[in-house]
Image: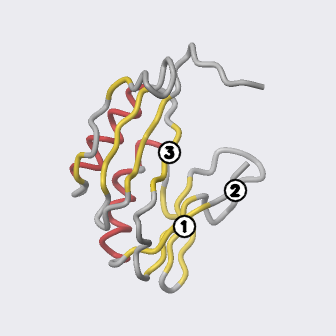
Amino acid sequence: MIDHTGFDVSNLELSKAFYLKALAPFGYAILLEFEGAAGFGAQTGVGDDPGGDFWISAGEPQTPRTHIAFHAANEEQVNEFYRAAIEAGGKDNGPPGPRPQYHEGYYAAFVLDPDGYNVEAVFHGTGSSRPA
């Protein structure tokens, strides 16, 4: 299981503003900041990283740009993420909708952040199953 992840961004203040708005539907906020870095997360249980599970740091963006997907609790949360991310300046990279090519019940939206990273919100559906 992944505990936390992140990447470098070209303009930390711009990216902090983008992610604060885009990730608000998931209950995310900035949980910890250091000079040149910010950690986002939603404290949901005992043992959660107090610094968050998603970090951005000032630096040279990764080439090629990476993809990150945030787990949504339902389709509406995917829709809310998409609206918030677009309002925050993100660029459409795939509007909310089913993606049956991935698996039955896969519902997602994709937005490019200010540096061109592909940010996704995904709900795996109530009928989806994963192999054990």
Marks 1 and 3 close (CB-CB < 8 Å):
no
Marks 3 and 2 close (CB-CB < 8 Å):
no
Specify the amino acid type for callout 3.
Phe
Of the residues under marks 1 and 3, which one precedes in the sequence? Answer: 1
Residue placed under numbered mark 1 in the picture: 39
Question: The C terminus is located in which quarter?
Answer: top right
Q: Give coordinates of residue 103: x percent, y percent.
A: 51, 23
Residue placed under numbered mark 3 in the picture: 70
Q: Nearer the viewer, residue 79 or 106?
A: 106
Real-space CA distance between mark 1 and mark 2, rounded to the nearest whole angstrom: 12 Å
Q: Residue at x 77, y 53 (%)?
A: 47
Q: Give coordinates of residue 34: x percent, y percent.
A: 55, 81
Tag 2 secondary structure: loop
Specify the amino acid type for callout 1.
Gly
Marks 1 and 2 close (CB-CB < 8 Å):
no
Query: Does residue 49 appear left or right of residue 41 in this picture?
Result: right
Query: Does residue 27 appear left or right of residue 19 in this picture?
Result: right
